[in-house]
Amino acid sequence: MKPLHHSPTHISFATTTTTFTVTPKCITLIQPTKANTSQHYSHDNLKRMEKMMNFSPLKSSSSERVRKRWKEYQGMRNWNGLLDPLDENLRAEILRYGHFVEAAYKSFEFETCSPNYATCRFPKSTLFERCGLPNTGYKVTKHLRATSGIQLPGWVDKAPSWVATQSSYVGYVAVCDNKEEIKRLGRRDVVVAYRGTTTCLEWLENLRATLAHLPFNMEGNGAMVESGFLSLYTSSPLGNNTSSFLSLQAMVREEIRRILETYEGEPLSLTITGHSLGAALATLTAYDISNNFHRPPLVTVISFGGPRVGNRNFRRWLEKQGTKVLRIVNSDDVITKVPGFVFDDDVAINERFHVARFSSWIQKRMEEIQWSYSEVGEELRLCSRDSPYLRTVNIATCHDLNTYLHLVDGFVSSTSPFRSTPNRFLQP
């Protein structure tokens, strides 16, 4: 089986030294507009994040109902009848996976002055406890790293070392190993969780928004995805794909193969979740696993605030695989509307109308310059303005993971008011 390949790209930089501000609140594909080296991710920021995350555990979803209908909650029927109004058990499951993404953020070392910058702060055995999630019923089995394929100019050697960090901790793999939780879920669940954009090179990869071919099989399915996302998924440190220098793709394949062999014969599910850049990586991971493994378990993506990932053929191939994708989208979040352009396939082929012919012409031009994207999966659409508890509605707030979890917690239906819920996901 051929792996997905993406050749490194050379990017030119201005000769003037540029500095970057790195914060944990990922805004994928938006370039910082003002450099500020005086504000790093401070101790106070970390404490505030810990306070937000150490809330009381959510009320668990109904054991019997989840156990009997777990395939529906994992998207077997495309969440038909569960999204509007939002099923209470599905709400609890979405928030549960959101906590796994929070743990990926919280376990990342943000301090640029630390020699451990961009690594995982905690060992696998205590990661959840140190992140304020002591009773998940899961154990972390693998730390994951993503590597940028961008080759930097020589002058970067004069910049602070954190600016040129090519490989960084991006998430983890965890396996449900608690008998009571396995019983509640109706199967053994495997989670792959990804954080959003954090390092300088990840920001630059996000800006590489043209589509790149995603070779998988000899048939040539025409699937294409955003160049930067593909680079982060397939690039390996120093061009070496052995030992500890594995690409994210290779690390995931290796660990999933080990887990499937270990628990062969058991009911399994694979849930891949992420926020922003992590949502894009989650979709790529699901595509890769479904293609790389013979008869994989049910593969489900639960994404928060994810950008567009690939073209129409990529979407069609995901559907053909049986991969289930649930996109949690805030209609006020600009990140979910980029990159590229999306065209309504049905309208574009209807030649009875002049506007349809014009749309078809535009779509063809966008495809030629590799900017024609397509939405994937099912969508749970939320809106910041529906919450009476959000003080501000701006780009950063609308894209923040805590805002997403707050909106999921308060959403009832598209025709019902926001419910009165504790503001556990919002900053004081």
Image (tube, grey):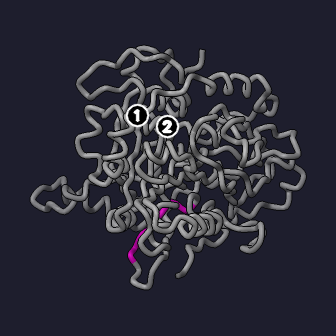
Whether residue 224 is visible, yes or no, is no
Q: Is residue 9 left or right of residue 57?
A: right
Give the x, y percent position of residue 40: 78, 32
Residue stretch in magenta:
221-227
Looking at the image, tell me whether mark 1 or mark 2 is earlier in sequence order: 1
Give percent across and percent down for residue 26.
Answer: 60, 39
Residue at numbered disc 2: 96
Please identify the quadrant where the C terminus is shown: top right
Q: Secondary structure at mark 1?
A: loop
Residue drawn at (34%, 63%) of the image: 322
Determine contact: label 1, label 2, CB under 8 Å.
yes
Identify residue type, mark 1. Answer: Ser
Quadrant location of residue 253?
bottom right
Q: Amino acid at mark 2?
A: Arg
Please provide percent x and percent y for residue 250: 63, 69
Residue 398 in view of the camera:
yes
Q: CA distance from mark 1 to mark 2?
A: 10 Å
Residue 63: quarter of image: top left
> Residue 61, labelled with which disc?
1
